[in-house]
């Protein structure tokens, strides 16, 4: 086996255990625009397991971002239930959802959402100042390879470096879950692989349950499991018996 290929554990929760972190049951999401109803999700059921790296794959409009937003407590389904461990997110109050997002979830978006007037260190400290059990901001930046760039402002950083700052900000709270929405979508091929390598290392070293949504089918090779979506439905679920390292991906 190639040194970079990693065999998948045989248990149900391939990333690091078979405990269910998320349980999604019969979830639908309907947006109403005037007299038109748009069904973004249609009766979706799935699980996410402790410590796994999951890729949600699908074209634009397939429902994957809507699903990620519901998992992250940014949106609620029209019908169905979502539980995080023993917490029913669909029955949670706004205050409970705010606490859940603050304490349990790290978000990484396609566009980095950094504060231009703050340095890399200060952008990460925005999270560590309010988190319950944070790691030092400098430690989070070291984990993504940016020790030498902590005093730089976003405009002084490349796109890949800005995305790594965003990842450092997301992981500094030591989240149970890392949700990544097209994290390489604004990056070139080489830089995108560097960012995926950071996400992969965070998943392995911190044991963070990680979901990456992407339209790029090549990224699926680095996942424990791949869930493919189309027209608001799950159309395929498969497990990678052997995972590829991000550096070995090509697209």
Image: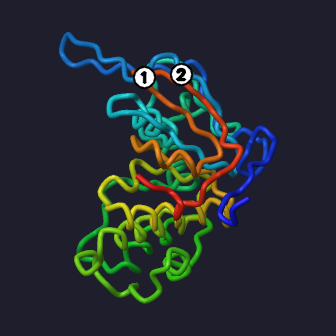
Mark 2 Cα within 10 Å, few/some/many (few <14, many 20+)?
Answer: many
Find disc 1 in the rendering and name its residue.
232
Q: Residue furthest top?
A: 35
Q: Quadrant of the N terminus?
A: bottom right
- The count of marks equals 2
Of residue 2 and residue 172, the one placed in the foreground of this image is: 2
x, y percent for residue 140: 53, 75
Residue, x 53% and y 45% (percent of image)? 220
Residue, x 39% and y 49% (percent of image)? 182
Residue, x 39% and y 66% (percent of image)? 190
Q: Quadrant of residue 152?
A: bottom left
Of residue 146 and residue 113, the one placed in the foreground of this image is: 146
Instruction: Tell me the distance, in whole angstroms, between the alpha carbons under discs 1 and 2.
Output: 8 Å
Find disc 2 in the rendering and name its residue.
44
SS category of the residue bearing label 2: strand
Of residue 189 and residue 215, the one placed in the foreground of this image is: 189
Q: Which of the two labelled residues, at mark 1 and mark 2, occupies the earlier sequence position?
A: 2
x, y percent for residue 7: 74, 52
Residue, x 46% and y 51% (percent of image)? 180
* Numbered tag placed on residue 246 in the rendering: none
Q: Quadrant of residue 239?
A: top right
x, y percent for residue 249: 50, 56
Q: Is residue 191 above or below residue 40?
A: below
Task: Decide if residue 195 is on the left or right side of residue 50.
Answer: left
SS category of the residue bearing label 1: loop
Q: Is residue 200 above or below residue 45?
A: below
Q: Residue furthest front?
A: 1
Task: Decide if residue 158 is on the left or right side of residue 228.
Answer: left
Tell me the colour scheme of the image.
rainbow
x, y percent for residue 150: 40, 85
Q: Are marks 1 and 2 in contact (CB under 8 Å)?
A: yes
Mark 1 Cα within 10 Å, few/some/many (few <14, many 20+)?
Answer: many
């Amino acid at each position: 086996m190639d040194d970079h290929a990693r065999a998948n554990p045989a248990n149900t929760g391939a990333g690091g255990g078979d405990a269910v972190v998320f349980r999604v049951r019969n979830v639908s999401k309907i947006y109403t625009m005037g007299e038109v109803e748009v069904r973004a999700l249609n009766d979706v059921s799935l699980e996410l397991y402790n410590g796994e790296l999951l890729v949600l794959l699908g074209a634009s409009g397939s429902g994957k971002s809507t699903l990620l937003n519901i998992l992250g407590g940014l949106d609620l389904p029209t019908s169905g239930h979502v539980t995080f461990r023993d917490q029913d997110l669909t029955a949670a109050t706004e205050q409970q959802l705010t606490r859940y997002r603050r304490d349990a979830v790290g978000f990484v978006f396609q566009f980095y959402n950094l504060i231009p007037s703050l340095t890399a260190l200060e952008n990460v400290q925005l999270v560590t100042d309010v988190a319950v059990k944070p790691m030092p901001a400098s430690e989070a930046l070291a984990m993504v390879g940016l020790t030498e760039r902590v005093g730089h402002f976003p405009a002084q950083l490349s796109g890949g470096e800005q995305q790594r700052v965003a990842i450092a900000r997301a992981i500094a709270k030591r989240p149970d879950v890392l949700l990544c929405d097209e994290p390489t979508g604004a990056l070139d091929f080489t830089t995108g692989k560097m960012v995926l390598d950071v996400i992969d290392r965070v998943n392995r070293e911190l044991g963070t349950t990680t979901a990456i949504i992407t339209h790029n089918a090549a990224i699926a090779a680095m996942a424990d499991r791949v869930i493919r979506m189309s027209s608001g439905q799950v159309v395929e679920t498969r497990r990678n018996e052997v995972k590829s390292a991000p550096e070995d991906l090509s697209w």
